[in-house]
Image (cartoon, coloured by chain):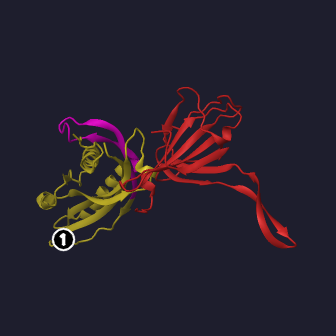
Chain colours: A yellow, B red
Amino acid sequence: MTTLPPTLSYNVETTLNVAFATAMAAFTRPAWLPAPSIVFDWTQIMASLPALAVAHLPVGTQDIWQGRHVGGGVKGERQTGIMEVSVFVTSDGNPAWRAQAGALRGMVTHWKTSVTALEISDFLTTPQTPTGTGYRVNIGAMADGATTADNANPAVQRARLLIDYSWTFRAS
Amino acid sequence: MANEVYVMSEGALRWVQASGSGENPYSAWKTGSAPPSGVLAYVQSFSYTSGAALTTIKDRGVPMHHKRTSLNEIQVTFQTLWTGAKPNLSAYNASVPMMNLEFEQDATLPVQSANYVQFHGVAIESLQFSEAENGNTMQYTCRALGMNGPTASGYIA
């Protein structure tokens, strides 16, 4: 029998999602900024604004180590992904929308800058009480896109932030 | 007979504490009893250069034949990502800590066989550490007394 590897992308993405949601909820916000809804499913973006929508874009693996040896008799590769965080606010009757978008972008930037790495949690084995795997995901550079209206509803303003991350995928 | 090309993902670089006992440590794979050993992980580059000093003898100004006047030391270099672990060597029957290295190119096809290159009496000449965004590196520059291979049989599993 082959057991599921604890460093598979589902665990990595979920680890990032949980850490991100926890960090966003911990911010002290000004009165003009309601608590953003944080969604991980695009169909829920319009449920409540302002919103932070998270999506993961797999980039690929890099076969860069001799024999794929990553210690402990295990084979592995470097795996990279992009965490896309979209800030959604509404400008409809909302004079503070630009400040809201800017504040939310700042919150995301603060989290990305302060967290250099996270321990990957195993959400597959015990989803409710995940335990640490002992392996980590490194959080890299970020691109902070400008606020644009690209939604079918012109009142919905969006800013995209793309955060690079990488980890060692271990085939064990 | 297939002649398939070996690639980096089939490689492995293993080390074992070497013994300096005997008259010709350069020509033999010598270790003590139950020596420490291991496989090097996160190897990003590996190379070796064997060498001999040749003198070309001329007959009235025309090259006629070669003489091998000496065997040179073998230069072995490799770079790993730095995890905090490295071969823990001590001087065993020698004044300088040495290891034997074995480079294996595994066979991923049944029609092909693995091949090995052994390096005898490898001393670490320098360690060069560098920080990098995608992993800090340790560059090993080593000098071997001798080598054997490529050959069809290996010492370290």
The relative height of residue B106 versus residue A155 in the rendered view (above or below) is above
Position in image of residue B108 (x %, y %): 37, 54
Position in image of residue B154 (x %, y %): 49, 43
Residue occupying image coordinates x 85% and y 70%: B59
In the displayed structure, does residue B86 sit left or right of residue B19? left
In the picture as drawn, the residue positioned furthest to the right comes out as B60
Question: Which quadrant: the N terminus of chain B?
Answer: bottom left
In the displayed structure, does residue A168 sit left or right of residue B123? left
Amino acid type shown at disc 1: Asn
Q: Nearer the viewer, residue A133 or B70?
A: B70
Q: Nearer the viewer, residue A68 or B2?
A: B2
- The disc numbered 1 marks a residue on which chain? A
User: Crowding at label 1, few (<14), some or many (≥20) Cα neighbours within 10 Å?
Assistant: few
The relative height of residue B17 versus residue B27 in the rendered view (above or below) is above
Residue to which mark 1 is pinned: A151
Q: Nearer the viewer, residue A75 or B70?
A: B70
Where disc 1 sits, the SS reads loop
Is residue A135 one of those drawn in magenta? yes
Q: Report the label total.
A: 1
Residue A161 shows in the view: yes
Residue occupying image coordinates x 54% and y 39%: B15
Is residue A147 one of those drawn in magenta? no
| Quarter location, residue B95 | top right
The relative height of residue B134 versus residue A94 in the rendered view (above or below) is above
The relative height of residue A69 versus residue B57 in the rendered view (above or below) is above
The residue stretch that appears in magenta: A113-141
Position in image of residue B36 (x %, y %): 53, 31
Residue B122 shows in the view: no
Q: Nearer the viewer, residue B122 or B106?
A: B106
Position in image of residue B12 (x %, y %): 47, 47
Question: Which quadrant: the C terminus of chain B?
Answer: top left
